[in-house]
Amino acid sequence: MDFELTASMMCANYGNLEKEVKSLEEGGIDSFHIDIMDGRFVPNYAMSLNDMNYIAKTANKPLDVHLMIEHPNNTISIFLNKLRKGDTIYIHPEAEYHPSTTLQKIIDADMIPGIAINPGTSVEMVSEMLRIVKKVLVMSVNPGNAGQMYLPYVGKKITKLLSIKEDMDFEIYWDGACSSQHIIEYAPKGVKGFVLGTTLLFNKDKFYNEIIKNIRQLNF
């Protein structure tokens, strides 16, 4: 079963971030998920620009940067200047007056454009943008904090996205409360990748290579 695993770095051990990055890469992680929060679009602050910059310089694997900020078009150039070609940037359409303008800046910088869809945002609300993005990050929890409960009605949204992803040429990624059962259910259906946080990857009494190996060997 071919699916991607990305590490939610807001859950990492910041006492030795370089070791975390290297251990995750050696363990077989596919990319690093960077949550940037401004305390306004979501009621929390998470990773900083400096955190993102450090991981970008340390990691060999790509970064998936999730901007949970108001009006990302005002500051998108700051992030583009710190990232590498081929990295992904997700924006929330709800946070921008003209999200397609921001997405075009990401495209022009040779990075992968994506949108993140909150649990309360319908597919119909973002349907036009689905034709210009390459990745859709489906939030299965309300954004802003790790360790939240899965919202089961999001499954119907994923089913709808799966039915149109081939025609519109985008891939679907799962973010929030990702369990083994969710991977077993949705990877065979066509969900491309899963963001791993405290539910499966971090704060466990096991090495990352063992955890990641076990996830890839799940019984589908």
Image: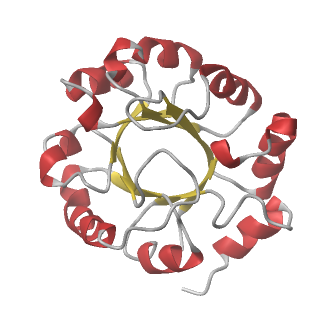
Q: Is residue 129 above or below residue 206?
A: above
- Furthest residue in direction front, as rendered: 43
Q: Which residue is painted at 52% across and 32% down in the image?
A: 36
Q: Is residue 18 above or below residue 135?
A: above
Q: Is residue 3 above or below residue 84?
A: below
Rendered location of residue 4, percent (x, y): 55, 58
Q: Which residue is painted at 43% across and 34% down in the image?
A: 68
Q: Quadrant of residue 138?
A: bottom left
**Residue 194 in the figure: left or right of residue 138:** right
Q: Quadrant of residue 218?
A: bottom right
**Residue 73 in the figure: left or right of residue 196:** left
Number of numbered callouts drawn: 0
The N terminus lies in quadrant? bottom right
Rendered location of residue 37, percent (x, y): 50, 32
Q: Which residue is painted at 58% across and 59% down in the image?
A: 147
Q: Is residue 88 visible?
A: yes
Of residue 94 and residue 165, the one placed in the foreground of this image is 94
Q: Which residue is painted at 76% across and 48% down in the image?
A: 25
Of residue 144 and residue 50, the one placed in the foreground of this image is 144
The C terminus lies in quadrant? bottom right
Q: How is the image coloured?
A: secondary structure
**Residue 72 in the figure: left or right of residue 192:** left
